[in-house]
Amino acid sequence: MSNVRKDSVSIYDSKLASVNSWKKQYMLDSSIMDAQVIAAINMSCDELALQFKEYKPLGLSSQHVWTRMLKVEGLFTVF
């Protein structure tokens, strides 16, 4: 194998390792953030007598804002 090819493979492997490391950190950060959001939603649902049905991360919006979708059910009474 030529030196140029070895160097290219080495660079590729290094970049791939960096991307994989970033993906792992993203998943960890997202799951921690999502857990905190879900806990807050659960508390609010308990206080308002609502049932928390679904929570779905949607990714980045067109404005580059992380978005989530949630569904709750129940009667909502304004005090």
Image: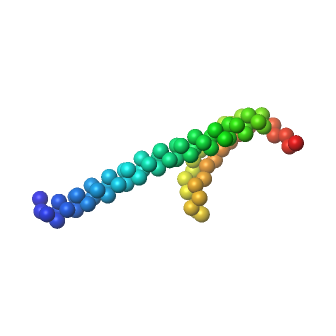
What x and y, as percent, mark residue 45? 73, 37
The residue furthest bottom is 4
Residue shown at 67% from the left, 41% from the top: 40
Residue shown at 42% from the left, 47% from the top: 24
Q: In which quarter of the image is the C terminus?
A: top right
Q: In which quarter of the image is the N terminus?
A: bottom left
Q: Nearer the viewer, residue 37 or 6?
A: 37
Q: Which of 71 and 43 is in front in this view?
A: 43
The residue furthest right is 79
Give the number of marks. Answer: 0
Instruction: Classify residue 5 by image quadrant.
Output: bottom left
37 sits to left or right of 3: right
Instruction: Classify residue 10 by image quadrant.
Output: bottom left
74 sits to left or right of 70: right
Name the image colouring.
Answer: rainbow
What x and y, as percent, mark residue 41? 68, 41
Can residue 68 be seen in this snapshot? yes
Q: Is residue 32 above or below residue 3?
A: above
Can residue 54 be seen in this snapshot? no
What x and y, as percent, mark residue 27? 47, 46
Residue shown at 57% from the left, 44% from the top: 34
14 sits to left or right of 43: left
Instruction: Classify residue 65 by image quadrant.
Output: bottom right
